[in-house]
Amino acid sequence: MAEIILVNTGAQPATACLLEADGQRIRRVPVSACGTRGMQAGEGLPLPFVVPGPGCVISHFPNQGPRLLFGGVADGQAKEFDLWIDVPPGLPLFTLHAWFIERSAARGGWEGDELQTLEWRCPPSAYTTAEIQTGGRHGLFHLRVPTPQRAFRFSVAEGLPLLMDRPKNPFPYAIVEAELTDPETLRSMDGRISLWRGPELLAIADTMAGETARFFTLPGGVQVRAEHGIDYRQESSDVQLRPGSVRRLHFPLQRQLRPDSGWVWGDQHTHTFHNDGGQSPAANARAARAEGLHYMFLSDSLEAFHDGFEDFNKTGRFLGMPGQEVDTPFTHCNGLNVRTEMPHLPYGARAERYPGPSQWIEVIRRQRECNNPCLLQLNHPSHSEALMRQPALGYFRSWWVADEFPDEVRVVENFDLPSWFDRLSRGRRLTGVWTTDGHDAVWLPPGSCRVGLYTHGRLTAPAVIDALRRGRVFCTRRPGALLYLAIGDAMPGDTIRTDGGALRVQIRAQSSRPIERVDIVRGGEVVGTLDGEGRSMLDASIEIGGMGQWVLALLYADDAPYPDNGHCGNPLDRSGVLAFTNPIFLR
């Protein structure tokens, strides 16, 4: 008999469960916020189990939500920790996520087979992922994990329970099936379906048009949510499930934002388990499409790009492109649409000399000479004061790259507004973008921060790269807003001639939250404000003086805080802005 310790590091209660001896009834046991609970496992006792939920990068989790970890065994003597998964029929694969385990010693295998060392991905990080192909098999899968010296996380992305002892009977699963449609077109659509029990996320499925999401989950009450990025309202349905039951749901999603024709959504910074992300390239592509993105750059190696990511490209609907992130201790950059490997040391490696911006720019120049468009994007050149003070985090103090290579660094992400404004006022054509820089596609999916890009509706690499270079951009983050700036016929990225007289600035906006105001910024100073009056739409103009080098707009909304997790918090997140445009230049 063993007492297994569970640890909840979140600010809301978590749930553990006991499966009674009849193999049907489930008793839920709370684990208090920031507390622990012991669960007895052994012959003749109810079977303890947990559903920690998907996702593996704890820094991406909501800070207030429950976060359930294993603390080991009570007597501290057991060197290994056994878990069991009852894999249902029809599941092609299941995905294990872990945090702070000795990955080289963790083993697993089907009952009756010899336990084998699991193939963990994401080598440089404390979190790790293993995908288990079932090959049509089902039944008990046994995991044996060395007991760490600290609390550790283990979960199954598909929401299957982790059993703390070998079950004698099949687990009493209930099944939920769900589909999404657009009621305006009556067509099936991409989207995310998720299962929740109170504040606890049990499972997600990023589902492509024509597919049906299928969950094997606990009997009892759950909430099923359906969404498709920021353009559509989230819908939900509360259901009661019985063991062995199948509940089928259909969600027609209603629009809340309607982008203008010619604009596409994209994200330019996201990671997979080929680098320091938690999911596969295919899972990231699914998440991007489920979020309503039209394009995305994958910020890992070309190997990652070819490992299932490009399989989700669909002409006129979604375009995935390579966006290799290369780094030194002093800067990080993305090579957008660079089709050859850019020189860099492996992630986390240290050396006396590093390939740097000069070498990266040379690769980009060679590719351009072959008429294959690409760009160098400067990543997160600034951050919070606390991070920027840390000597080891020089890559959060890297505006120098944009200054040293003004002709080649044409795009910058996740920056502080004053530094961007300063460079615009010094004559720089530097497109500003807001990216997710995501490492966990569950809690911070691609498109959580996004680029609205005017490509005349074309979804090709040349069209995307050209629009980014020209600065035909506005940006927003969840919960989302549209923000269009015009002076006459000019849009962001254009240059207009002015004699210094008055200019009439036109603003059109839609927001998923009540609009507080839109500030008009000229040369770094707010020169006019349009009151949103708490409305969801704004169509207004304002007259400003024509002196200065550039004009852009910032939108603020009520009840739109940036995501409450340990990853977010770059200067754009903290600025209070929900959306911003790139500038129209004045001459």
Image: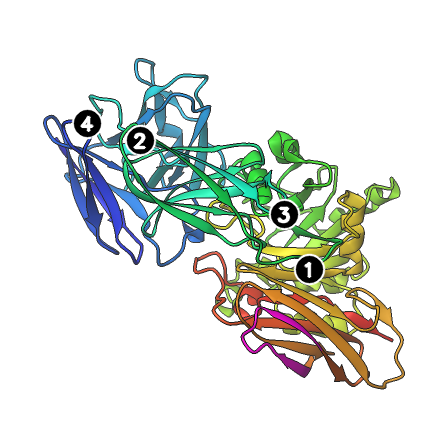
Q: Quadrant of the N terminus?
A: top left
| Residue 293 seen by the camera | yes
- Disc 3 is placed on an element classified as loop
Amino acid under disc 2: Val
Would you name the residue on which mark 3 appears? Answer: 293
Would you name the residue on which mark 4 appears? Answer: 23
| Residue stretch in magenta | 527-540
Mark 3, residues whose alpha carbon is within 10 Å: few (<14), some, or many (≥20)? many
Residue at left offset 31%, top offset 34%: 161
Separation of marks 3 and 2 at Cα, in angstroms = 38 Å
In magenta segment, residue 440? no
Q: Where residue 412 is drawn, which disc sits there?
A: 1
Mark 1, residues whose alpha carbon is within 10 Å: few (<14), some, or many (≥20)? many
Amino acid under disc 4: Gly
- Cβ atoms under marks 3 and 4 closer than 8 Å: no
Query: Which-is-in-front pick, marks 2 and 1?
Result: 1
Would you name the residue on which mark 2 appears? Answer: 145
Looking at the picture, tell me which residue is in the foreground, 286 or 254.
254
Q: Residue furthest top?
A: 112
Amino acid under disc 1: Val
